[in-house]
Amino acid sequence: MFAIRQLIRFGWGQALSCVFPVAIFASLAITQWISLPWLPRYDWLLVLCLLMQWFMVRSGLETVDELKVITVFHLIGLMLELFKVHMGSWSYPEEGFTKLFGVPLYSGFMYASVASFLCQAWRRMQVELIQWPPLRLVMPLAAAIYLNFFTHHYWIDVRWWLTLLVIIVFWRTWVTYQVGRVRYRMPLSLSFVLIGFFIWIAENVATFFGGWEYPNQSDAWQIVHISKISSWLLLVIVSFLIVATLKMIKLRTK
């Protein structure tokens, strides 16, 4: 019974941390099933995301500091979207007034929702890191992972080498989190894999509701290729490293 209660507590904390991503999925589903008036679908999605972001801060579900972090991720994600759509990796085939070079502005909120989850789960679960490597290793690694999303179109894809570097750099790093009065821990690399896997599942839901479209989904929806887990894994690593670094810098400046 204790294990069941702990699992329920853990699930509830994760559910609260996923409010923003769930709101995006709900918006995708609603706008897919119901034709809203006056604006194209992508524009309504932007309006709904902005309203949700306002509600998150206004209600106290997100702090102002977390909003700053999330805004950074919105911009990072939008830059990646602009490049990937230009290279034909995926597309947004519907019309919209708020599209920039083929990319609807609401797309940045999908990356921001990942940062929202990380920030809220960090706060609710009282996350702590054990044997975190020095910043001189963490920051270049995060930059190299992000740049590889761009450079592999022109050069070799070094994602597996970068994954190996992540394992080496974070081999001794553990993440601890609290559920109720009990603290648990797991290897940080395992947490990367788990989050990346669940984001891949979320990606399948998002593409099913027409959030965006891969080339092989132009005629009919198909499950996103399992190889995309590696891409989300690396993106989660970048997201986590940025959030962790910003939180540590904030602690040191207090």
Image (cartoon, grey):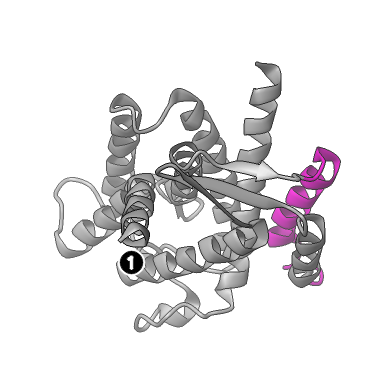
The answer to whether any part of residue 97 appears in the image is: no
User: Would you say 208 lies left or right of 99 here?
Assistant: left
Quadrant of the rendered image containing residue 93: bottom left
User: Would you say 235 lies left or right of 2 here?
Assistant: right
In the picture as drawn, the residue positioned furthest to the top comes out as 254
Query: In this picture, which residue range is highlighted in magenta?
Result: 133-156
Q: Where residue 67 appears, x then y in whole percent? A: 46, 30
Against 105, is 86 above or below?
Answer: below
From the viewer's side, name the closer residue of 74 and 44: 74
Q: Residue at x 60, y 53 (%)?
A: 80
Against 220, is 76 above or below?
Answer: above
SS assignment at label 1: loop
Residue type at numbered disc 1: Gly
User: Would you say 39 lies left or right of 79 here?
Assistant: left
Reading the image, the residue beneath label 1 is 210
Question: Which quadrant of the rendered structure holds the N terminus?
Answer: bottom left
Q: Where residue 233 appears, x then y in whole percent? A: 61, 64
Q: Where residue 243 appears, x then y in whole percent? A: 60, 40
Residue 147 colored magenta? yes
Q: Where residue 161 appears, x then y in whole percent? A: 81, 69
The answer to whether any part of residue 252 appears in the image is: yes
Q: Residue at x 40, y 78 (%)?
A: 218
Q: Residues within 10 Å of mark 1 (few under 14, many from 20)?
A: some
Q: Residue at x 28, y 35 (%)?
A: 51
Question: Which quadrant of the rendered structure holds the C terminus?
Answer: top right
From the viewer's side, name the closer residue of 81 and 1: 1
User: Would you say 12 lies left or right of 114 here?
Assistant: left
Q: Residue at x 45, y 24 (%)?
A: 64
In the picture as drawn, the residue positioned furthest to the right comes out as 136
Residue 136 colored magenta? yes
From the viewer's side, name the closer residue of 196 and 49: 196
SS assignment for the magenta stretch, majority: helix
